[in-house]
Image: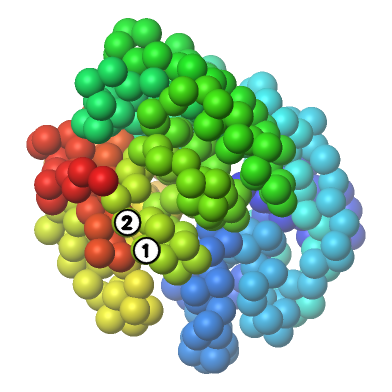
Amino acid sequence: MWSSRTASRARKSGRPPANADRLVGGSGTLVVSAETDGLRALARQWPVLEEYVRKGGTLVVNVEAGRALPEKLLGLKPTGKQTVAEEWTPDGGQPLTATPYEVADVELAGAKVLAWAGAKVPLITGSSSDQLNKGRTYTFTPFARASQFARAQLQMSKLVSDTPKVAVIFENTAFGTSTSNGLKELAPGEGVEIVMFEPYSAGFTDASPLINKVKSSGANALFSVSYLNDLILIVRTVKQVGLNIAINGGSGGFVIPDFYKNVGKLAEGLQGVAHWNHDMDPNAEKVNTEYKKRTGEFLFEYAGGLVAQTFMIADALERAASTDPQKVREALSALDVSSGYAAMAPGGKVKFGPDGKNVYGRPVGVQWQNGDLASVFPKEDARAPLLKT
């Protein structure tokens, strides 16, 4: 079981099952990662990973992230071709997102196909899209939904102004659309005025026209629903045009170490939301300490969430005493933990409801402080006071 934003499809004799993910590798312990930035960090230590693989270890990665690793380590060669799939779901339902699902073609170059994951295989994912849980029984989401992120951002806007007037800018992807729509729908109930609601093309190269619109809107707070490169450009442009505005970068690119590396002191005091943070409980702090020793960086939400998800899967496998997908699905649906690494989530509890959502799931509000990401909201999850900037 693994999750990714980009599925991979290997060329081999015969035709793979419809809507199938592919698992590749040798035998041994799995190292699971679904994020490009996490694998780039691993790539800096690839000689160590090469030795790990040579001794029988297995890497399970998505192709998009795997481009950061050497071909001889992966045993795969991306062809550079993309296939657009009209739908991809773990259990044969409707499309997961509002946009087509891209499938990257690869050729085997030493790797072996171990298994094809068919329609009814359990999927546990840190993705925040609210659409994931609709009409599905094999999809489990242990962390906050996009709509919950939106409510947290709106509530945080009142930490900096009694009368928040918010400009919302968002990338035109499923992530951006889902999160921003949640902001728009929930704003009236939270007493927040949305004075601008503007999509932009993900990966744009000039943010000046967009930020000038924000400047003219009269907003005293800016919500940017963006991934890393876009958010870096937006923050730099805000400073370049001299716009004095509180920024909540949401999740995505805002909450990873590379954001601070790229904007430096400009990040100080900026707020965001995350489904996981490294200071939220003793177990998370313990994992983060070990990770930081090895990498020099804190463990960001995607990677930390994957650690928790791995222990959730382990818990389910032990209780199922089987690798049969149906039995593992039943064990996951009965997961109810409030201690240990599997419970590393805001609030410290994970229990899946009938729709596969964690009934205790909620985001944590964060702020960049002294080059680190501190949990500051809500009060029960705060590990540091909010810095007013």
Q: Residue at x 68, y 54 (%)?
A: 22
Hey, what amino acid is under mark 1? Lys
**Picture coordinates of residue 202 (x, y %)?**
68, 42
Q: Are marks 2 and 1 in contact (CB under 8 Å)?
A: yes
Q: Residue at x 64, y 76 (%)?
A: 69
Q: Residue at x 49, y 17 (%)?
A: 195
User: Pointer 2: what residue?
Assistant: 268
Question: Dot 1, crowdedness within 10 Å: few (<14), some or many (≥20)?
Answer: few
User: Pointer 1: what residue?
Assistant: 265
Hey, what amino acid is under mark 2? Glu
Q: Is residue 206 left or right of residue 48?
A: right
Q: Looking at the picture, does residue 187 appear above or below residue 68? A: above
Q: Looking at the picture, does residue 153 appear above or below residue 320? A: above
Q: Quadrant of residue 155?
A: top left
**Picture coordinates of residue 207 (x, y %)?**
65, 44
Q: Looking at the picture, does residue 104 appear above or below residue 86? A: below
How are the residues colored? Answer: rainbow
Residue situated in front as seen by the camera: 333 or 260: 260
